[in-house]
Amino acid sequence: MISPNEVKARAQQKKNENYAFRTFLKVQADPEKLDRQFLKLHKELFRNYDCNACRNCCKQFRGTLSGEEAAQCAENLDMSPDEFKAKYLHLNKEGMYDTNHVPCDFLQEDGSCLLGDCKPDDCTDFPFTARPDRWSSLLGIMSNVAVCPVLFEMIERLKNEYGFVYHRNNRWY
């Protein structure tokens, strides 16, 4: 599998190819079959992958929490919800809470998360390939290929499964 330090550059090299593959999937893929393929690859590839050795997602994005998740995390850290929010979070336009900084405020030097097992769903679900309706979110998936080495590998394997061949003139076969 590609290393966390290489994924951004390799994804940039494959950017046009990956977006052509997205178009290919939108035209050719059965949405339910695609969900099954993503889920199978997600389970297989994440089974033995140590996300603590990478944490590109935590380094490049803010954490996002619901009010309920913020309260649970505050309790986990022996803080009041107000104290937790004041120290780590701000309210975003969607009514959710984002961490104040990038990299995520909860990312520890060793790659672990300060929140431990109390991580919000958006963190534990990244890169969202185990969720249903992946066909509708292929644009987001393709943008995250540059962040997650596991997702990079998933897309490469899906190209093989579909027999996708990219040519620089934006045609596929």
Image (cartoon, rainbow, N blue to C red):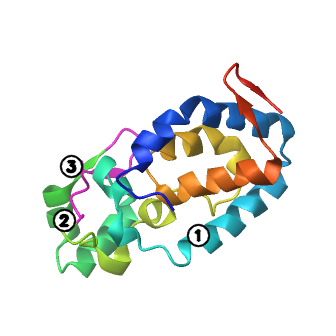
Q: Camera-side residue: 89 or 168?
A: 168
Count of marks, rendered view: 3
Spatial distance from mark 3 to mark 2, Cα to Cα? 12 Å
Label 3: which secondary element? loop
Could you tell me residue 34's position as x and y percent? 78, 54
Q: Is residue 35 left or right of residue 153?
A: right
Residue 45: give its label.
Answer: 1
Residue 100: give its label.
Answer: 3
Is the C-beta separation of discs 1 and 3 under 8 Å?
Answer: no
Q: Is residue 133 visible?
A: no
Could you tell me residue 83's position as x and y percent? 14, 65
Q: Is residue 154 visible?
A: yes
Label 2: which secondary element? helix
80 in relation to 166, above or below: below
Is the C-beta separation of discs 3 and 2 under 8 Å?
Answer: no
Spatial distance from mark 1 to mark 3, Cα to Cα? 31 Å
| N-term-proximal mark, 1 vs 2 | 1
Q: Is residue 100 left or right of residue 21?
A: left
Main SS of residues in magenta: loop
Q: Is residue 56 left or right of residue 106?
A: right
Q: Which residue is depicted at the point 17% across and 75% down? A: 79
Residue denoted by label 2? 84
Is the C-beta separation of discs 1 and 2 under 8 Å?
Answer: no
